[in-house]
Image (spheres, grey):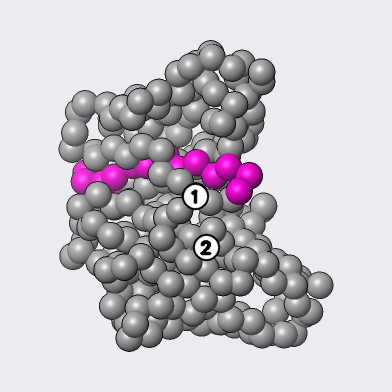
Amino acid sequence: DSGVTQTPKHLITATGQRVTLRCSPRSGDLSVYWYQQSLDQGLQFLIQYYNGEERAKGNILERFSAQQFPDLHSELNLSSLELGDSALYFCATATDPNTGELFFGEGSRLTVL
Amino acid sequence: AQTVTQSQPEMSVQEAETVTLSCTYDTSESDYYLFWYKQPPSRQMILVIRQEAYKQQNATENRFSVNFQKAAKSFSLKISDSQLGDAAMYFCAYRGGNSGGSNYKLTFGKGTLLTVNP
């Protein structure tokens, strides 16, 4: 158990809908990263937050947004969903800046029908 | 931009044998970190081993070791005495050097699916 909690574990929804994925980091971790894992694209970095502020953006669509709250949990919002958004969405948090290690949650499996 | 390439989509090994997974990367940085992550069917990403680029000595964690060739930008993972529980997808990942302490984005390869045969 990495200590990073993601909810929900599974989510099935329809095209055009909006969903929110939640991530609770390990105690003391200030950085939260969101990754998307799909069969064709592999693991793609979406966005990073550090202590409530956005710090880096990757291949995140405009239909997607994220935020990190004062209690350090983070939410990834996906709107106007398309079939191609079906994927596993991971949250990862960083503890020690010197090791560079990220601790991953178990992921949220999103299926868009 | 940094890229990570894993040229072996799938590999198989007999239980108790040794297998080596390949990874190459492209970067213009001199200070960086390299990782191997394991993703079993449970889908949890688990760190297997890490290597700091400034260290010449290859990292080792029990049955797992790396062959880090900085000039060749190569970072292979060797699994000795393979066990059934080693069956998983293995991802090679790159992270740039400490750029102010708050951005530790990992860039991943496409992964290698390892099968362990009894």
Seen from the viewer's position, the closer of residues A69 and B76 is A69
Q: Amino acid at mark 2?
A: Phe
Do badges 2 and 1 share one subunit?
no
Could you give the CA–CA distance between mark 2 and mark 1, rounded to whole angstroms? Answer: 9 Å
Q: Which residue is mark 1?
A: B45
Identify the image quadrant of residue B57. top left
Where does the image place residue B24, in percent across and percent down from the top left? 43, 35
- From this view, report whether residue A109 is shown above or below residue B107: below
- From this view, report whether residue A48 is shown above or below residue A40: below
Identify the image quadrant of residue B111. top right
Q: Is residue B40 magenta?
A: yes
Where does the image place residue B82, in percent across and percent down from the top left? 52, 21
Where does the image place residue B56, in percent across and percent down from the top left? 20, 28
Tell me the quarter of the image containing the C terminus of chain A.
bottom right
Residue span colored magenta:
B28-42
**Dot 1: element:** loop
Q: Which residue is mark 2?
A: A90
The disc at residue A54 is none
Q: Is residue B36 magenta?
A: yes
Mark 2 belongs to chain: A
Q: Amino acid at mark 1?
A: Met
Residue at image coords 38%, 85%: A69
Residue at image coords 24%, 56%: A96
Compared across the picture, whether A104 is left or right of B10 comes to left
Residue at image coords 49%, 49%: B45
Please report contact status of discs 2 and 1: CB closer than 8 Å, yes or no.
Answer: yes
**Dot 2: element:** strand
Compared across the picture, whether B14 is left or right of B61 comes to right
Is residue A61 visible in the rendered structure shown here? no
Where does the image place residue B27, in percent across and percent down from the top left? 33, 46
